[in-house]
Amino acid sequence: MPLSRLHVPDIAAEVAARGIVADISGTTIWRWLSEDAIRPWKQRSWIFPRDPNFEAKAGRVLDLYARTWEGKRLGKRDFVISADEKTSIQARIRCHPTLAPASTRDMRVEHEYDRGGALAYLAAWDVHRAKVFGRCEPATGIEPFARLVEQVMTTEPYTSARRVYWVVDNGSSHRGQRARDRLTQRWRNARLVQLPVHASWLNQVEIYFSVVQRKVLTPNDFTDLAEVEARLLAFERRYEQTATPFEWKFTRVDLAKLLERLSDKPDYQAAA
């Protein structure tokens, strides 16, 4: 059948067409499916680490989260920043005003909307101080990221810090040796620490972005991009009033165990 997924009506029609049953209700099919061990309507995606130095590169970041670097404890004048970009945030201008929830009615958001443009939200999260710096830009790129870095590095205590470690993924704005050189040439006390490919899940700022998505951008209902930017920046101030460092529990030991489990899989061995 030219279907990627079967729904209950599809199954009911198929078993009747094959003569397995004369008739069957959707409720019966659903009950049988719920009790069965095989659940073909569910799926999980996966990807293997492809970087041969994945453990070493990821381990450095996990060390920083634990306030160590190259086997030594970080000092009081050392800071760890997790940074990234949240791209293509749209201003969806609803064709009819959103109705607030009432005692017998959920919030009603018009399905149709006009596109009011899109912007990128760049954020830097101080891992140990629960401090967030953010800015909105028309697009991502080397220069917008440099402006985020400047926003942080011209603020105390980072300006006079002994070392500021910037944890980033492999986005084009901060990828490779050139990106590391750009940072240290402009800010002598800054160091770019790049995660391996497919390791954004180890970047703590992604946790903050998930909070932003749930609390600020859902539902997406704005009059223009200026309102999007104003809400994002206002949320930063509100969030910091009660923010605490994330309770990060994934350590080098956990990473080693994960990679050991993966190493036993034939598909992983072939990918490596």
Image (cartoon, helix red, strand yellow):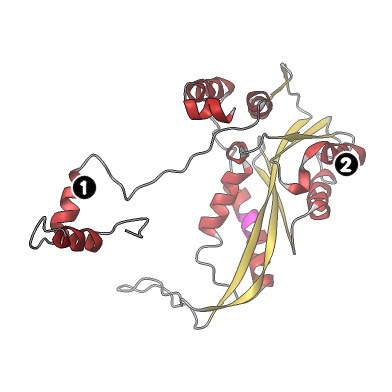
Disc on res. 34: 1
Residue positioned most to the right: 185
Estimate the x, y position of residue 161 in percent, counting from the top left: 83, 33
Q: Quadrant of residue 250?
A: top right
Residue positioned most to the left: 22
Q: How many marks?
A: 2
Image quadrant where one finds the N terminus: bottom left
* Labels 2 and 1: the sequence-earlier one: 1
Q: Residue at x 52, y 22 (%)?
A: 263
Q: Can I make out residue 250 in this image?
A: no
Q: Which residue is mark 2?
A: 182
Q: Residue at x 22, y 58 (%)?
A: 11
Query: Of the residues shown, which amino acid type is indicated by label 2?
Result: Arg
Decide whether residue 49 is among the magenta residues: no
Query: Of the residues shown, which amino acid type is indicated by label 1?
Result: Ser
Estimate the x, y position of residue 119 in percent, counting from the top left: 69, 64
How far, Cα to Cα, is label 2 from label 1?
Answer: 56 Å
Is 169 rendered above or below residue 26? Answer: above
Task: Judge left or right: residue 185 versus residue 193.
Answer: right
* Residue span colored magenta: 234-238
